[in-house]
Each structure stands twice: as C-alpha cells, then as structure tokens.
C-alpha cells in the first residue's frame, strides 16, 4: 500500500517537474535549432558545392595553377590573373567579366577555361554553376537561330537567377552565328538588372580561332628578329588581332569582329614557341576591365 502511495506521489509530481524544466529545455532546443539553421549553409558548403565561389578565391592558388599548367603564355597569365581575381574579389562589380581567348586549336583556350572554373568552383567544368556551349554541337542549324536565341536567353536568365556567380563558356565562337551573340550582348553591359535579374556578377568566356594567323605572324616576326617570346607586349598583339578579327569571316559569312561588343579592351597574347623551333600556335586574350581596375 505504501508502495502504491509512493508511486502515485511520484506520478503527481511528474507534471510539476516537467513544467519546471520545460522553459529551459525549450529555450535550449530553440537556441540549438537557430544555431544549426544559421550555420547550416556554411556546414553544407564544406561537403557540397554552393553558388558562392569555393572558400575565397586565392590569387596565389590561381597564379600557381597558371604558372605550373600553362606554358608560353606570359601575357595571357597576367591578364587572366588580374581580371579573374579582381572581379571575384569585388563584391559589387558594375558589369559582368568577359574574356575572349583567341588562338589555334590546341593552344590552351579550353585549358585556361578549365583552370578558371576549377579555381572558382569545386566541380570545375562539371559544376552546376559552370555552363559550356559548343557552337557546332549546341547550335548546329542556322535555320533554328531564332529558337536557339530564345533558349539561350532563357538558360542564361534562369541560371543567373539561381546563382549570380554563374560562369558561361562559349567555344568555337568563330563558327557561331552572330545572331546568337546579339542575344547575349544585353547581359554584358552596365545594367543594374534586366527584367529583375542582375548579371553583374556573372562571367562570360568566349573561345575563338579568329585572329590565330595574325598571332602566329607576330610571334614569327619576333623570332626572325632574334627576339624572345617574352619580349612580345600587349601593344604588339592588339592591332594585329583587331584587324584580323575584323577581316576574318566565320562560317556564317559574318566578320568575326561583329561578334564582340564594343568597348572591350584588348590585351593580346601570343603563341607558344620553344628556343630553337617555333611552334606556330597562338593564344590571345581580350579581357574586359573590371570595376576595380583594368585587366591589363
């Protein structure tokens, strides 16, 4: 009987104990949930890819990759390093970063794009925030240009809406119909937003063979004059590349210069060549100045 009364007493006291502890437990639980909620994005991004560039972009890491993986392109290295790091480290750029890489097939244009992507996102070219378009693969039929333009604009708008730091890479620009670039041009200018979407933090990289012959000619002239490749300066490439791009027509019969927006700065770069035998390959870069300075 005493045991029964004791048990009943404990049962009667239990609600009181629960009520006494409840405010403290509830407060601790809410604090724990709030802390987890606040830190969740940072914790999540340690194990999965997020829109924000991995950690903070390291200038040293990017330079190390360019120095150890890209050879014979001293001007391109300088332009790319300054342009990419300056742009990513700027929290409020006034317009997107645009880079145009020129040169023969096999000179490193796609490789440079890969290095840039890998230094910004963990997944590199496989990242959900990096988008690669190849003219002959994704836009093969001139008769479908209107459809391609609508789809391309929709794709860019949707992905930038989801991630402001999206990267778009367009390969074989010399084979791309000029109408498609007309569809992209509005996103490359000084607009705070277009239809409610800001493109100022996006990166656009254009790869083209246009101007490759003139790049080779400039490098060959230096070699014949007994000068080293490293003596070629930006100014030596700018005029030659701009004239070549204007005169060179792509497969659509449109001058290559028709493809690029006005107002781009054009720091050029040069072909790769060894000490004795010049390798007639070239890579040049047209870099868009960033808000904090120029790409040169």
Image: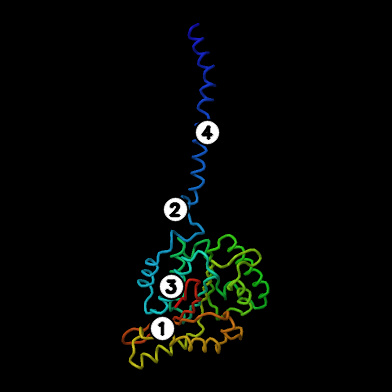
Residue under circle 3? 82
Spatial CA distance of label 2 from label 4 is 29 Å
Residue found at the far front of this picture: 292
Counting other residues with Cα less than 10 Å from the Cα at mark 4, is it few (<14), some (14-19), or many (20 or more)?
few
Q: Earlier in the sequence, mark 1 or mark 4?
A: 4
Q: On the picture, is 293 further left or further right than 246?
A: left
State the residue at coordinates (54%, 67%).
Answer: 202
Q: Earlier in the sequence, mark 2 or mark 4?
A: 4
Spatial CA distance of label 1 from label 2 is 39 Å
Spatial CA distance of label 1 from label 4 is 68 Å
Q: Badges 1 and 2: C-beta atoms under 8 Å apart? A: no
* Residue 204 horizontal/vertical position (percent): 53, 71
Q: Earlier in the sequence, mark 1 or mark 2?
A: 2
Residue under circle 2? 46
Residue under circle 4? 26
Residue under circle 1? 271
State the residue at coordinates (38%, 74%).
Answer: 70
Secondary structure of the residue carrying numbered label 1: strand
Task: Nearest to the eye among marks 1 and 2: give it.
Answer: 2
State the residue at coordinates (63%, 69%).
Answer: 153
Q: Earlier in the sequence, mark 1 or mark 3?
A: 3
Above or below — where is 69 with respect to 26? below
Secondary structure of the residue carrying numbered label 3: helix
Spatial CA distance of label 3 from label 2 is 27 Å
Spatial CA distance of label 4 from label 3 is 52 Å
Task: Nearest to the eye among marks 1 and 4: give it.
Answer: 4
């Amino acid at each position: 009987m005493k045991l029964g009364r004791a048990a009943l007493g404990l049962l009667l006291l239990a609600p009181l104990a629960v009520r006494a502890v409840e405010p403290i437990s509830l407060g601790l639980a809410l604090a724990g949930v709030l802390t987890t909620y606040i830190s969740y994005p940072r914790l999540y991004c340690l194990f999965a890819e997020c829109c924000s560039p991995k950690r903070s972009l390291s200038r040293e890491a990017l330079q190390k990759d360019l120095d150890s993986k890209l050879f014979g392109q001293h001007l391109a290295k300088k332009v790319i390093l300054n342009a990419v790091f300056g742009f990513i480290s700027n929290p409020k750029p006034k317009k997107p970063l645009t880079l145009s890489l020129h040169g023969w097939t096999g000179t490193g244009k796609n490789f440079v794009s890969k290095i840039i992507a890998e230094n910004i996102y963990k997944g590199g070219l496989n990242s959900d925030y990096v988008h690669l378009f190849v003219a002959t693969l994704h836009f093969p039929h001139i008769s479908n240009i209107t459809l391609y333009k609508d789809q391309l604009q929709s794709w860019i708008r949707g992905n930038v809406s989801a991630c402001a730091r999206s990267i778009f890479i367009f390969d074989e620009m010399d084979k791309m119909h000029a109408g498609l670039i007309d569809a992209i041009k509005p996103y490359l200018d000084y607009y705070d937003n277009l239809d409610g979407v800001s493109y100022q933090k996006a990166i656009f990289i254009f790869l083209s063979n246009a101007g490759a012959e003139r790049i080779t000619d400039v490098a060959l002239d230096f070699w014949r004059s007994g000068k080293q490749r490293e003596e070629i300066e930006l100014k030596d490439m700018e005029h030659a590349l701009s004239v070549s791009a204007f005169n060179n027509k792509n497969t659509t019969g449109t001058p290559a210069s028709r493809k690029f927006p006005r107002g781009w700065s054009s720091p050029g770069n040069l072909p790769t060549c060894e000490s004795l035998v010049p390798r007639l390959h070239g890579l040049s870069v047209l870099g868009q100045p960033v808000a904090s300075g120029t790409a040169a």
